């Protein structure tokens, strides 16, 4: 018997490859909790990234380095419970995969088993090749991340645009091709010149997802709290703010405070 429920076609890594092949752009946003992940999924987002940017926007840290594997699993589990369609990708946090492929595999297995997510993401190219290879042996889809890689902020010393010089640009393209060859299903390109992102996107069969990487990548990603205007004092050129939720929420809270102080809330109809 046919089910009365309309079947939801899930986004898989194969669907993403097909989207690139037919020139359909991929939309990705971050989420870290059930309520917002549900809104994103019902709005039709293709990929939800449980990013380690949770370290900044959820926990208030200055960098992404302090967030732990357990905290990432907590955020990812909440997101997965909300999602019916989108592919859920989870960042491997700093210290959970670099320089140790066995640890990388163990961390990825924990993420997949304990959160129910669909894929992991890690930062770097040739330096993390062993980890990528080993995670893939367990059948866990891996997404790469090149360009500005925030977990290496103390090495770079700045959040400025990366790979403006040809030598670094060539390494980036070589790393992207290596990640593809190893079996990654996609790669995030962060804060690099648009021409370089175009060059990499044209050479790769797997999709590139850009953030501050111009219009030629196969998809785009933004940090949800930035595009909704929940964060303040962060205005990079690439960020389009779709709302100013900081002011909207602050206004609502001020209104509530006024209502309580003026004994206007609750009224007769708002009590038992
Ligand atoms: O952690 C994150 O939000 C990310 C995006 C910036 C791509 O890695």
Image (cartoon, rainbow, N blue to C red):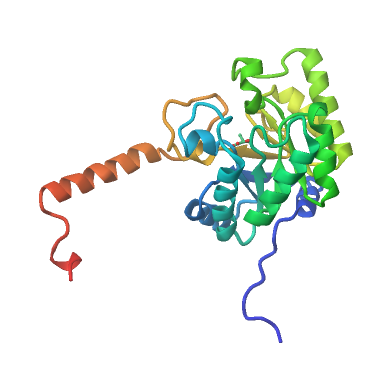
Relative to residue 54, is residue 146 depicted above or below?
A: above
Q: Position of residue 248 (x, y in %)?
A: 34, 42
Coordinates of residue 55 in the picture (x, y in percent): 53, 35
Question: Total of numbered circles in the picture?
Answer: 0
Q: Quadrant of the N terminus?
A: bottom right
Residue 87 appears at what percent x and percent y? 67, 53
88 to the left or right of 266: right
> Which quarter of the frame holds ligand 1?
top right
| Left or right relative to 146: residue 212 | left
The residue most toward the bottom is 1
- At a point 62% along the width and 39% down the height, the residue shown is 221
In the image, residue 130 above or below residue 136: above
Residue at the image position 59 percent from the left and 16 percent from the top:
158
Frontmost residue, 267 versus 91: 91
Q: Residue at x 18, y 71 (%)?
A: 272
The answer to whether any part of residue 159 appears in the image is: yes
Image coords of residue 75 (percent x, y): 55, 48
196 and 146: which is toward the camera: 146
| Residue 241 makes an appearance in the image | no
Q: Residue at x 45, y 33 (%)?
A: 60
In the image, farthest residue toward the right: 181
Q: Residue 161: which quarter of the image?
A: top right
């Amino acid at each position: 018997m046919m089910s009365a429920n309309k079947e939801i076609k899930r986004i898989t890594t194969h669907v993403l490859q097909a989207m690139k092949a037919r020139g359909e752009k991929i939309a990705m946003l971050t989420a870290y909790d059930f309520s917002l992940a549900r809104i994103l999924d019902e709005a039709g987002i293709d990929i939800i990234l449980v990013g380690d940017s949770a370290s900044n926007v959820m926990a208030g840290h200055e960098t992404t380095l302090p967030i732990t594997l357990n905290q990432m699993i907590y955020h990812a589990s909440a997101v997965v419970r909300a999602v019916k369609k989108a592919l859920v990708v989870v960042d491997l946090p700093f210290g959970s995969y670099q320089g140790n492929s066995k640890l990388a595999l163990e961390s990825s297995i924990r993420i997949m088993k304990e959160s129910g997510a669909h894929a992991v993401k890690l930062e770097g190219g040739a330096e993390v090749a062993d980890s990528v290879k080993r995670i893939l042996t367990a059948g866990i889809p891996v997404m790469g991340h090149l360009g500005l890689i925030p977990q290496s902020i103390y090495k770079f010393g700045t959040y400025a645009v990366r790979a403006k010089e040809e030598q670094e640009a060539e390494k980036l393209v070589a790393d992207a091709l290596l990640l593809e060859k190893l079996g990654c299903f996609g790669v995030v390109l962060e804060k690099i010149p648009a021409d370089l992102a175009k060059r990499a996107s044209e050479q790769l069969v797997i999709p590139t997802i850009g953030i501050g990487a111009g219009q030629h990548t196969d998809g785009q990603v933004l940090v949800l709290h930035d595009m909704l205007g929940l964060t303040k004092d962060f205005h990079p050129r690439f960020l389009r703010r779709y709302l100013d939720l900081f002011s909207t929420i602050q206004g609502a809270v001020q209104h509530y405070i006024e209502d309580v102080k003026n004994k206007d809330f609750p009224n007769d109809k708002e009590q038992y």
